[in-house]
Image: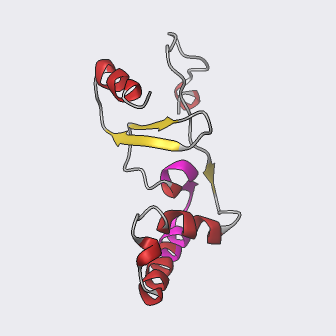
Amino acid sequence: MMLQQGIETLPYSLDFPIVMDKVEETLSDINVAIETICNINPNYALWPDFEKVGLQKRVAHYLRSLDKIALTFTLNQLRGTPSFVLFNDSYEIIAEWFGHITYKEIADKITSFN
């Protein structure tokens, strides 16, 4: 997006790490993506098989309908921009939230996990 606007580097520095999503035309393994999305539901493992199959089919249909797939957003079912994702040292997601919040609110969220 920045390159499209003629900006090759940020004109200012950031004091926190950022991550950009990877966009693909198709998923290399759609079955892994389907399971990843379905398992976001904390009760998915408890569902009867017919409900699991129904959700898997809806997710597969959704994934196949996309022209391009933003991997992180799609696989983690993030709602939009800005989305914040907090990882631990093992790169596991320990928190995520959507929308603008103050720097202090971000710092409070981070320190609450220490």
Outermost residue on the bottom side: it is 50
Residue 61 in the image: x percent, y percent?
50, 76
Q: Is residue 32 above or below residue 93?
A: below
| Residue occupying the far front of the picture | 114
In the shown orientation, is residue 65 left or right of residue 108? right
Position above or below: 52 against 76: below
Q: Quadrant of residue 26?
A: bottom right
Locate the C terminus and report the quarter of the image it occupies: top left
- Residue 24 found in image quarter: bottom right
Along the horizontal axis of the image, is 3 left or right of 56? Answer: right
Classify residue 82 by image quadrant: top left
Residue at 49 percent across and 13 percent down: it is 15
Please check the rendered image and state whether residue 80 is part of the magenta-colored stretch, yes or no.
no
Q: Residue placed at 35% from the left, 29% from the top? A: 109
Which x, y percent locates residue 30? 63, 69
Per the rendered image, the range of residues in magenta is 60-73
User: Residue placed farthest to the top in the image?
Assistant: 12
Answer left or right for 9 relative to 44. Answer: right
Main SS, magenta region, reads helix
- Give the residue furthest to the right: 28
Q: Position of residue 31 (x, y in %)?
A: 63, 72
**38 or 29, which lies in front?**
38
Q: Is residue 69 magenta?
A: yes
Residue 16 at what x, y percent from top left? 50, 19
Q: Name the image colouring.
A: secondary structure
Please give the name of the residue rendered at 42% of the width and 77% of the height, measured from the top-left corner: 46
Which is nearer the eye, 7 or 80? 80
